[in-house]
Image: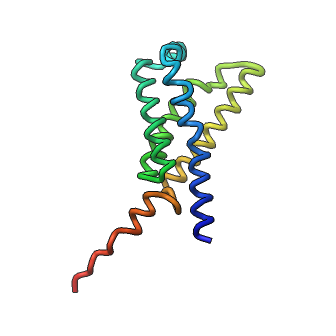
């Protein structure tokens, strides 16, 4: 039973962070100049710096959560990314009609991902994680009489 729980937890973490990793390596890094222009068009300050920071949050956060190594920190990094991305890029209140509906759906999906990140921050990576492995290998401290 423990092995199945670990495998499901690993699969869940990989599925959860796949979108963040692919966003960085499949879109933001290879299309850096175009993404800087997009960020600038949304009114975000210091677009080049924001993009470099965003890529760092995506890569470090997704690797951390995927491996379950300091997963609480990694999930917090992804949460920070999501807050900024959701505010600047899914501002459905500034649109009308079908575009507003599409942006609201993307906004709500990001809220769901934010919720998942907060759950990891609260509970940790769980079974099948490096955090759990490291924790299990620590020797208990001897109590003093």
Q: Nearer the viewer, residue 99 or 78?
A: 78
Can residue 36 be seen from the camera position used here?
yes
Q: Is residue 22 toward the left or the right of residue 50 in the image?
A: right
| Residue 29 position (above or below residue 134) | above
Q: In which quadrant will I find the C terminus?
A: bottom left
Can residue 123 be seen from the camera position used here?
no
Residue at the image point whose x is 65% and y is 24% from the top = 93
Residue 142 percent across, percent down from the top left: 26, 79
Residue at the image point whose x is 60% and y is 59% from the top = 7
Q: Nearer the viewer, residue 40 or 3?
A: 3
Q: Is residue 132 toward the left or the right of residue 116 in the image?
A: left
Q: In which quadrant will I find the N terminus?
A: bottom right
| Residue 33 position (above or below residue 132) | above
Task: Give the residue furthest to the right.
Answer: 98
Residue 108 percent across, percent down from the top left: 66, 37
Residue 103 percent across, percent down from the top left: 68, 26
Q: How is the image coloured?
A: rainbow
Residue 53 percent across, percent down from the top left: 41, 29
Residue at the image point whose x is 61% and y is 37% from the top = 110
Residue at the image point whose x is 39% and y is 62% from the top = 134
Q: Is residue 115 toward the left or the right of residue 132 in the image?
A: right
Task: Give the residue furthest to the left.
Answer: 145
């Amino acid at each position: 039973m423990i092995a199945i729980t670990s495998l499901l937890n690993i699969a869940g973490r990989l599925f959860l962070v796949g979108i963040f990793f692919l966003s960085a390596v499949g879109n933001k890094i290879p299309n850096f100049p175009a993404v800087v222009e997009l960020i600038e068009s949304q009114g975000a300050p210091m677009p080049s710096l924001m993009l470099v920071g965003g890529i760092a949050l995506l890569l470090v956060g997704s690797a951390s959560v995927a491996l379950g190594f300091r997963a609480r920190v990694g999930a917090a990094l992804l949460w920070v990314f999501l807050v900024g991305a959701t505010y600047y890029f899914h501002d459905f209140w500034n649109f009308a009609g079908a575009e507003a509906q599409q942006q609201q759906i993307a906004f709500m999906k990001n809220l769901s991902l934010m919720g998942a990140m907060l759950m990891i921050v609260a509970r940790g990576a769980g079974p099948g994680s490096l955090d759990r492995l490291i924790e299990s290998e620590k020797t208990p401290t001897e109590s003093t009489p």
